[in-house]
Amino acid sequence: MTAAPQSAPRTVIETRGLTKRFQGLVSVNNVTFQIAEGETLGVIGPNGAGKTTLVNMISGTLTPSEGQVVFEGQVINDVPAFRRAHLGIARTFQVMKPFHGMTVLENVAVGALFGRGAERSMAAAKEKAREWLEFTGLGRRIDANAEALGGPDRKRLEFAKALSMQPRLLLLDEVMAGLNPVEVDEVVDLIKKIRGQGMALLVIEHVVKAIRSLSDRVMVLHHGEKIADGDPTRVLEDPRVIEAYLGKRRT
Ligand SMILES: Nc1ncnc2c1ncn2[C@@H]1O[C@H](COP(=O)(O)OP(=O)(O)O)[C@@H](O)[C@H]1O
Ligand SMILES: [Mg+2]
């Protein structure tokens, strides 16, 4: 028997001509991209470029005006958000919102109950939650009230919640916002650890240094349109990309 030819990594998420309009405004315009298993796509673009709107259409909180969201070969445009979570799509929010009145452990256990792994009992969910809290470096705070956590620990909580869902695709929307450089490095290290788990990752970030060190590919959105997609170094040095970021102030 000869060995089977090595197959290309499978595509986990794909969009085809994805478009979102709000009244007259086109927030996301005809965006097509893919992310393969184990691949990290960095997404950058100025404020208002449509990054969060794109994530919302993938996670299911917004319905596309046109185009398709394809997850593991299946068009999921009509699949509600909770079912997408169950299929294996998890996200973090730009504005962190822990469940009110619950401990850190309970917050993460909810993820384990409703994600792809769908633990059957609260005891099993808490066991999983404990493991992910150790993984994200929050093991020492499991009994704290989630709302009492400071900024960096809240981000760790968001990561643990998302990971406890055992996603195939993880969407990270500006998780480094508001962190100091040391904290940014800690989150970069955590994302590198997550990359080793084999899922597809979409990382939206303004910190270019972090994007450069994390991404296999970088996609740039500008006024809702994709203006670049490729090798991080090449994309970040593209004059059109620099122009989009610095605009008229560029000398
Ligand atoms: N629910 C909404 N209703 C109307 N306009 C929206 C809505 N959500 C986003 N937008 C608009 O869409 C554009 C893209 O926003 P967003 O996706 O949040 O950009 P980014 O995350 O890149 O900063 C912005 O002009 C924003 O005002
Ligand atoms: Mg945003």
Image: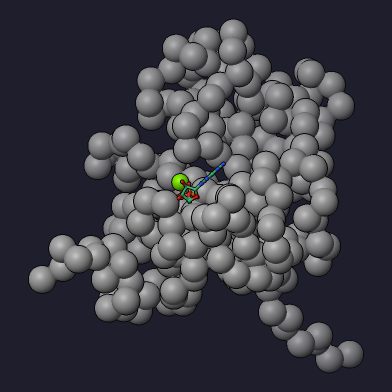
Residue 201 visible to the viewer? no
Q: Is residue 95 visible?
A: yes
Identify the image quadrant of the C terminus.
bottom left
Asked if 146 appears above or below 231 in the picture, the reply is above
Residue 233 lies left or right of residue 1; in this view the side is left
Colouring used for the render: one colour
**Camera-nearest residue between 205 and 135:** 205
Query: Residue extending furthest bottom?
Result: 2
**Image quarter of residue 71:** bottom right
Residue found at the far left of this picture: 251
Q: Position of residue 84 (x, y in %)?
A: 77, 46
Height in image: 178 above or below 71? Answer: above
- Residue at coordinates 43% horizontally, 26% vertically from top-left? 153
- Count of numbered circles in the view: 0
Quadrant location of residue 108?
Answer: top right
> Residue 189: x percent and y percent?
40, 47
Image position of 152 with respect to 23: above or below: above
Q: Relative to the observer, which residue lies in front, 78 or 85?
A: 78
> Image point 58% across, 50% down: which residue?
22
**Residue 208 sits in which quadrant?**
bottom left
Q: Is residue 173 above or below residue 237?
A: above
In percent of the image, x 55 and y 55: which residue is there? 24
Seen from the viewer's position, the closer of residues 232 and 56 is 56
Q: Quadrant of the N terminus?
A: bottom right
Is residue 123 shown left or right of residue 240?
right
Residue at the (24%, 65%) spot, across then down: 247
Q: Position of residue 34 (x, y in %)?
A: 63, 69
Q: Position of residue 40 (x, y in %)?
A: 53, 62
